[in-house]
Every structure is written in structure tokens, then in C-alpha cells.
């Protein structure tokens, strides 16, 4: 539910805030920026750089490649596979022919053993990969000859090919050390367009172009991701010229609109902001309180005031313009109806306007991530709307290390979303058996009908049956909202125009690290490259 490199779930350890003083002492671009180098500001860093532990599982990892990749239009294309898979046995087998002549950045050849090793290791329960359930459909993965890999599934999992953008790790390196704590987790070797040169945790990730990359050596020779958790600091460093580009909240990006030499890019996304309403909290876990909050919140006002119009109201994990959205599940802002629900459930207003029931005050804390202005503003707006209905929500800022131990009892302003397939987000978000599993099902949501529907959606190969299953999920969330979904957010980036006219994809919640205009930095052709 955090910005993920590990949807999903991808979750993420956090960077420390970089002060301006620290920036002066350790400038990511101090080696001399030119057209053949780029320094971009992102908000988070991963826990690990090993795909065996979840890094890059949704693609665009730069250090690695998957069997397949996603193009600008989110269509699958071959990567380490030479073609899209051959699907047989009524959707139970996926056969991949591998691209020949590919080498890892250490010069060793890539082959079928690396694919088999990667998937088998992730599926091993001893591997600390929080996204293992995403590969639940795999029964076995086998090498057939020198250039063919066959996946056999337990059930016809419709979006399986999309799962194979997952990066491939080298068996000859990662297989020779502890998968959870070995040096490969911070000093990775892959087949991708870039090679990691240094990871200064909490500060930056530095890359150089891989001269032996099978897709051709990138023209941007040096690429740096500066890890700047605080939105204001990121904007300041961009304005000072310390960064070539950055992801920014819409209101901060607005300040760069007329800046010479900079371009603004707005990416459509599935990224949502939501408030977890933990089942184990006696107020937030009360169904009447949940239903009332769902109506009391003014989503349109949040889109206008917080996002500057760069987004849309959210009524669940699926955006309203998606083919998977269940029409009729939109919730109208209706404060009077919210109050009526609370009245009927026995939550009566006290002298201070805050409701009580059986001696319990309608109050609970709501945590948001320190330095994240969008989450802070969403949290404050949500608390303000709740108070109008007689519910007292106290907003608190903290790091994930502070927040995570409190998630079972306290509400959290969280994020998530994946454009790949409804299963990619909804299963880990809502499945009751995943409650308490890291950042999966942060609200400890427990709804038998939803459990059955997400399983049906995952296991059916029939598009109509899958659509019906995910419609059921969304309609149950309207009746029994374990989360208050607030907005779907467009991602806004500001980048120097010397890199030409760039593109964006439809993005997941994970933004900046694997997404953004630099999703295909290896294809950039900047003018006036360094001599």
C-alpha cells in the first residue's frame, strides 16, 4: 500500500529527508551533468534490489529484464523471451522461447536455468518475498532444452503473461548466497540497460549504461535517482538546477508551469489514496461508522483543492474510467445521510458535537507518511469532513517504521493501485487471510463474499465471469467499506526539455522509481550528448 517496488504489495522502506545542506554536501549530479547524464528526484527507495525479494516485479527495473515487458500503451512485448508465450492446455501451460545471445552485466550468459531459478526461488516459502501470492497459480516451471521454459499452472489464471514482466536473476550469483541477506540484495547483477554503480541508502541510486545490453547501449550514459522524501525539498532542488527532473504533487508542479527549459508531464494512473478502517478498532471497525464516513467525505472537493484537478474521485480500487469499474457504485457526498446512518446505529452527538455509543467516543487516529504533502492534505480533509458528521479523527505523521506496528488498530492514509489486472491489486488488498501480512490487507478487512469473489476472479479464465466477480467486490465495498477510498491521482512530473519529448505509461501506485517519463530512459536520445 506504500509506493511499491516490492504492489504491491509492494512494500517499501523509506528514505530520510534530504536537507538543502545535505544536498550541497552530496550533489548527485556533482560528477558533471550533461546531455548524456540525468539526475531525477524520487520519493522512495526499495527495501532491496533483488527481484527474488520483489524488486521490479511490475517492470521497468533498469538493472534487470523480465521475459516480457510493457510498452508505452501497456501492451506486452518480448524482452528476454523472443516472442509472446504460446498458451496451451486451455490456459494451463505457457511456453516461452528465450532470446539468444543475452548476457548478464558480468559477462556470463543468460539462459533457461536463470528463469527456472528465479521463479522457483520466489515460490520457496523460505524466501522473504511479500508478493509470493501473486504467483500462486504456478504449479511448476521447467526447462525444455536450452532455449525453452514451460510454466504449468494449477488453474487458468487469465493475467499470467502479465506476471512474467518479473525480472530474472542470475543463478550463478544469487544462487550462491543467502537469498534474503546476501550481497545480491544491494549489489545486483542483471541483463538490463543499466548497471548499478552505487546505492547510498537514503540518498541516491547511481547507474551507468550497460555497454553490452542486448537492446543496444543507452545514450544516457549516467542515470541517478536522488531519493528525496520531502516534496518541498524535491521542488527546491529541481528549481535550483540540482535535478533534471522530479515527481511532484500537482500544486507544487504548478509552480514550474512557465519555467524555461522544463516540461510538465501528467501520467494517468490507477494510483489511489484511501483510509484504512481497521476491523480491530472499535470505532473504525463499526460498519455504521464506515458507511457514514463513505458518504461524509467530499471527494470532488479533494480533487479540486488538493490535486488541482489532476485526478478523479475514487470509490474503490478501480478508477471510474476503467472497463472493470462497476457502474452504480459511485457514492454521492451526502452529510445528512451520513448523520442519519450514525443516528440509527446509536451513535449520538455529545455536547462537543462528537458522537458516542455505549460510552465509546467516536474517535480514532489517522496516520500519514511524514513529508508526503498529498497524504497529509488528504488526511486533513478527511478528518475535517468526518468531524462534520460527529467523528473525531486525529491526524498523526510518522515513518513506516512508526506506522506499521499500529496498523491493526489505527487508521492509515494509504495508497495502492495497478493497471495490469484487477487481481493484481484487489487480492492483496482485500483477502482476509492476508491480514497482518506486511502491507497486505492493511485494514484487516474480513468479508466472506469478497473473499469468494477475489478467488473467483483469480481462478476463472472467462472474461464475463471475471467481470461479474470484480463487480461483486466493488458492490460489497459500497455496502461494507473497510476502506474509505478518496481519490485516484494523476502523477505529475517536471523534466528538463533537453531530453526531448518524453512519454509516460498508465502508471501503478509505484511512481518515480519504476515509472515516470524515465520509464524508458534507455531509449532517450538527448541532443548535444557529452563528447
Image: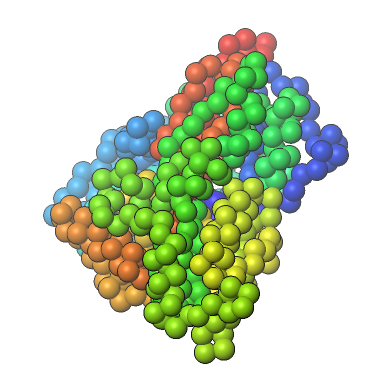
Quadrant showing the C terminus: top right
Observer able to see residue 47 = no
Foreground of the two, 145 or 148? 148
Q: Is residue 10 left or right of residue 36?
A: left
Residue at coordinates 58% horizontally, 79% vertically from top-left? 350
Q: Is residue 155 left or right of residue 100?
A: left
Q: How many marks?
A: 0
Residue 256, position in %: x, y? 64, 26
Residue 271, position in %: x, y? 46, 48
Residue at coordinates 41% horizontally, 81% vertically from top-left? 345
Which quadrant holds residue 219? top right
Residue at coordinates 58% horizontally, 62% vertically from top-left? 383
Task: Tell me if residue 151 comes above or below residue 288 in the rendering.
Answer: above
Task: Tell me if residue 230 comes above or below residue 393 in the rendering.
Answer: above
Residue at coordinates 80% horizontally, 43% vertically from top-left? 19
Foreground of the two, 250 or 76? 250
Observer able to see residue 226 = yes
Task: Tell me if residue 225 comes above or below residue 10 in the rendering.
Answer: above
Residue 304, position in %: x, y? 50, 41
Q: Residue furthest bottom?
A: 358
Which quadrant holds residue 24? top right
Give the colour scheme of this rendering: rainbow
Which quadrant holds residue 178? bottom right
Residue 435, position in %: x, y? 46, 73
Q: Is residue 7 left or right of residue 202?
A: left
Foreground of the two, 279 or 424? 279
Amino acid at each position: 500500500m506504500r509506493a511499491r517496488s516490492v504492489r504491491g504489495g509492494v512494500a517499501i522502506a523509506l528514505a530520510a529527508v534530504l536537507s538543502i545542506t545535505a544536498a550541497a554536501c552530496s550533489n548527485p549530479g556533482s560528477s558533471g551533468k550533461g546531455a548524456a547524464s540525468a539526475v531525477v528526484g524520487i520519493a522512495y527507495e526499495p527495501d532491496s534490489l533483488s527481484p527474488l525479494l520483489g524488486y521490479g516485479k511490475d517492470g521497468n527495473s533498469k538493472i534487470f529484464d523480465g521475459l516480457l515487458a510493457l510498452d508505452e500503451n501497456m501492451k506486452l512485448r518480448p524482452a528476454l523471451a523472443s516472442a509472446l508465450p504460446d498458451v496451451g492446455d486451455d490456459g494451463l501451460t505457457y511456453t516461452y522461447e528465450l532470446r539468444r545471445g543475452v548476457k548478464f552485466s558480468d559477462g556470463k550468459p543468460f539462459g533457461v536455468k536463470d528463469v527456472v531459478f528465479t521463479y522457483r526461488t520466489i515460490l520457496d516459502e523460505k524466501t522473504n518475498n511479500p508478493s509470493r501470492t501473486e504467483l500462486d497459480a504456478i504449479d511448476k516451471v521447467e526447462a525444455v532444452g536450452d532455449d525453452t521454459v514451460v510454466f504449468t499452472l494449477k488453474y487458468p489464471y487469465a493475467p499470467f503473461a502479465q506476471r512474467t514482466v518479473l525480472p530474472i536473476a542470475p543463478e550463478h550469483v544469487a544462487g550462491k548466497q543467502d537469498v534474503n541477506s546476501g550481497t545480491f540484495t544491494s549489489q545486483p547483477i542483471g541483463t538490463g540497460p543499466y548497471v548499478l554503480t552505487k546505492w547510498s541508502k537514503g540518498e541516491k541510486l547511481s547507474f551507468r549504461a550497460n555497454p553490452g545490453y542486448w537492446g543496444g547501449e543507452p545514450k544516457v550514459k549516467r542515470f541517478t535517482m536522488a531519493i528525496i522524501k520531502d516534496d518541498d525539498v524535491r521542488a527546491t532542488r529541481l528549481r535550483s538546477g540540482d535535478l533534471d527532473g522530479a515527481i511532484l504533487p500537482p500544486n507544487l508542479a504548478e509552480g514550474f508551469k512557465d519555467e524555461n527549459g522544463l516540461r510538465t508531464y501528467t501520467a494517468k494512473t490507477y494510483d489511489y489514496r484511501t483510509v484504512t478502517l481497521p476491523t480491530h478498532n472499535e470505532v473504525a471497525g463499526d460498519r455504521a461508522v464506515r458507511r457514514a464516513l463513505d458518504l461524509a467525505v467530499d471527494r470532488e472537493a479533494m480533487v479540486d483543492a488538493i490535486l488541482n484537478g489532476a485526478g478523479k474521485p475514487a470509490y474503490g480500487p478501480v478508477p471510474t474510467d476503467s472497463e472493470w469499474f462497476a457502474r452504480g457504485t459511485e457514492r454521492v457526498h451526502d452529510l445528512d445521510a451520513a448523520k442519519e446512518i450514525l443516528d440509527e446505529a446509536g451513535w449520538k452527538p455529545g455536547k462537543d458535537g462528537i458522537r458516542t455509543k455505549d460510552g465509546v467516543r467516536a474517535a480514532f487516529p489517522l496516520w500519514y507518511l511524514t513529508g508526503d504533502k498529498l497524504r497529509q492534505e488528504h488526511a486533513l480533509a478527511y478528518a475535517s469532513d468526518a468531524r462534520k458528521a460527529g467523528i473525531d479523527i486525529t491526524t498523526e505523521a510518522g515513518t513506516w517504521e512508526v506506522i506499521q506496528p499500529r496498523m491493526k488498530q489505527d487508521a492509515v492514509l494509504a495508497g495502492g493501485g495497478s493497471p495490469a489486472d484487477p487481481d493484481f491489486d484487489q487480492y492483496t488488498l482485500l483477502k482476509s487471510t492476508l491480514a497482518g501480512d506486511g502491507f497486505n490487507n492493511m485494514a484487516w478487512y474480513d468479508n466472506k463474499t469478497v473473499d469468494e469473489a477475489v478467488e473467483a476472479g483469480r481462478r476463472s479464465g472467462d472474461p464475463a465471469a471475471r467481470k461479474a466477480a470484480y463487480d461483486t467486490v466493488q458492490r460489497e465495498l459500497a455496502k461494507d467499506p473497510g476502506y474509505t477510498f478518496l481519490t485516484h491521482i494523476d502523477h505529475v512530473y517536471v523534466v528538463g526539455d533537453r531530453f526531448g519529448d518524453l512519454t509516460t505509461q498508465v502508471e501503478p501506485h509505484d511512481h518515480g522509481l519504476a515509472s515516470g517519463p524515465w520509464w524508458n530512459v534507455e531509449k532517450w536520445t538527448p541532443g548535444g550528448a557529452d563528447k
